[in-house]
Image: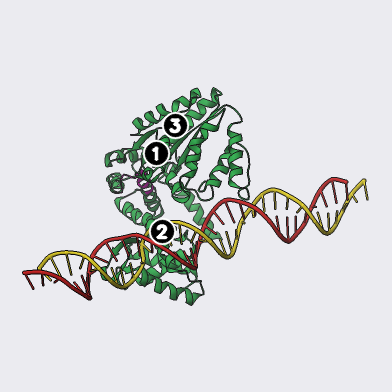
Chain colours: A green, B yellow, C red
Amino acid sequence: MLRIGTFFENFLKKDSIFVEKSILLSAYMPNEIMYREDQIKEAANILAPALRLERPSNLFIYGKTGTGKTLSVKHIMNSMNSIAETNSIPMNMIYLNCKLKRVADTEYRLLSQLCKEFGRDVPSTGLPTDEIYSIFYTLLDAKKQVIVLILDEIDHLTKKIGDEILYNLTRINAELKNSQICIVGISNNLIFSENLDPRVKSSLSEEEIIFPPYNALQIQDILRKRTAKAFKENVVQMGVIEKCAAYAAREHGDIRRAIDLLRVSGELAERSGSLVVTVANLDEAERKVESDKIISAAIGQPKQFQTVLYAILLLFPQKKHFFTGEIYEIYKTICTKNNFNVLTQRRISDILAELDMLGIINAKIISKGRYGRTREISLSLEETITIKLREVLEKSLRVS
DNA sequence: AGGTATTCACATGAAACTATTCTCTGAGTTAGG
DNA sequence: TAACTCAGAGAATAGTTTCATGTGAATACCTGT
């Protein structure tokens, strides 16, 4: 008790190398967005008519992860919403992230979330979907107003439940008497719209804006700006920012990743009692971020996913590549030994495909000619991560 | 040698089924007047 | 009689099974030289 107390006291006394760590968290909203002036201006031009209660064109925004899409759109949203409020214009922009589980990832939940935005609480389940639709209609049409609906990660939505809901939303305007609705879709999949119903595609992407990736120099600039605010002076050593930017630029210019890396480097440096952030800290952070990402992705999965992954990890020391059938055999023995119910190979095939998408494994479909067609699966993880991952899975599945 | 047909071992797709979660409804029950 | 309880119906959803169909290229099998 006493000892832990002194630990905390020491912790308090030790001065931090951070001034304001929250600046390096992904939730942080800078009030100035660098290198995105053009895109913001364009988007603002397209959306501005909403303030005059005219319906803006539907807008589609593309760009890879960490290119500032969400940030820019939220920026516009905040300023337009506050202008609307001060001038009491009946215009409202609503932001929804379609990826969030249990919030807006199905047709029903999306609509019920929208109803909640209008201040009407609806049950989270139990109602027929058309009833939710009609509630939404009446709420929307209750008074004259313009609604700008921002759907972030819209590709997740359509992948899961198809594009019918988008079609309905784009058509809704024809049936509304008082209100107008405009849809802003954000996607980090550049070819997303190609497998969309042509009707949806043409009406949804009346306007399009593309967010290009940041290049290494821009990332450096942004990092410097954030560093200046987040860290104390002269804490971050020469070369750290440059290398951090290089790492991120390699990963298609993902600024979020760069900022993450910088923060973790700082945390690692601080934890080791150092007063400066070195390149070595950065390298360590790179490894830690990578392994944390994989491990947390693995933990978040259902039991069967973990079992399949565990089967792969058991196979891994023996050889570099393996096929669906081999994994299925191991998986079956694990299940019977531990009294899990055994799923069909069909399902395992899907699970493997999903693990691949999560980036936990690498799967490639190859044909072995006479000997069939299958997934060739490999792990691209470092050994330390595999060991750690295995321990974690053993604990969570209670197997050995 | 060159061409084609087979064939393997899964992949991929669609539909249907199961279990769970949640609401609403209405019958039965209880407590108070 | 009003308030309360609780089982059952209806709906959405996640996870799965069943059945059906697709597929890329190494081999087997021809064919004609």
State yes or no: residue A61 in magenta. Answer: no
Report if residue A223 is visible in the image: yes
Q: Helix, strand, or loop for circle 2?
A: helix
Q: What residue would you read off at disc 3? A: A76
Q: Nearer the viewer, mark 3 or mark 2?
A: 2
Report if residue A25 is visible in the image: no
Q: What residue would you read off at disc 1? A: A69
Q: Position of residue A279 (x, y in %)?
A: 29, 51
Provide the chain ID for the residue under circle 2: A
Q: Position of residue A55 (x, y in %)?
A: 48, 27
Q: Estimate the spatial distance between the alpha carbons at disc 3 and disc 2, rounded to whole Å.
A: 35 Å
Reply above or below: A375 against B7.
Answer: above
Disc 1 crowd, CA 10 A, few/some/many (<14, 14-19, 20+)? many
Q: What residue would you read off at disc 2? A: A354
Q: Taking B27 as reference, is A68 left or right?
A: left
Type of amino acid at the residue the image marks with label 1: Lys
Q: Estimate the spatial distance between the alpha carbons at disc 3 and disc 1, rounded to whole Å.
A: 11 Å
Q: Position of residue A70 (x, y in %)?
A: 42, 39
Q: Helix, strand, or loop for circle 3?
A: helix
Q: At 40% from the left edge and 43% from the top edge, which residue is drawn? A: A187
Provide the chain ID for the residue under circle 1: A
Front one among A323 and A133: A133
Mark 2 vs 1, N-terminal side = 1
Write down the region rendered in magenta: A251-260
Q: Helix, strand, or loop for circle 1?
A: helix
Q: At 61% from the left edge and 43% from the top edge, which residue is drawn? A: A131
Image quarter in which the N terminus of chain A is found: bottom right
Q: Position of residue A260 (x, y in %)?
A: 38, 48
Q: Nearer the viewer, mark 2 or mark 1?
A: 2
Magenta highlight: main SS: helix
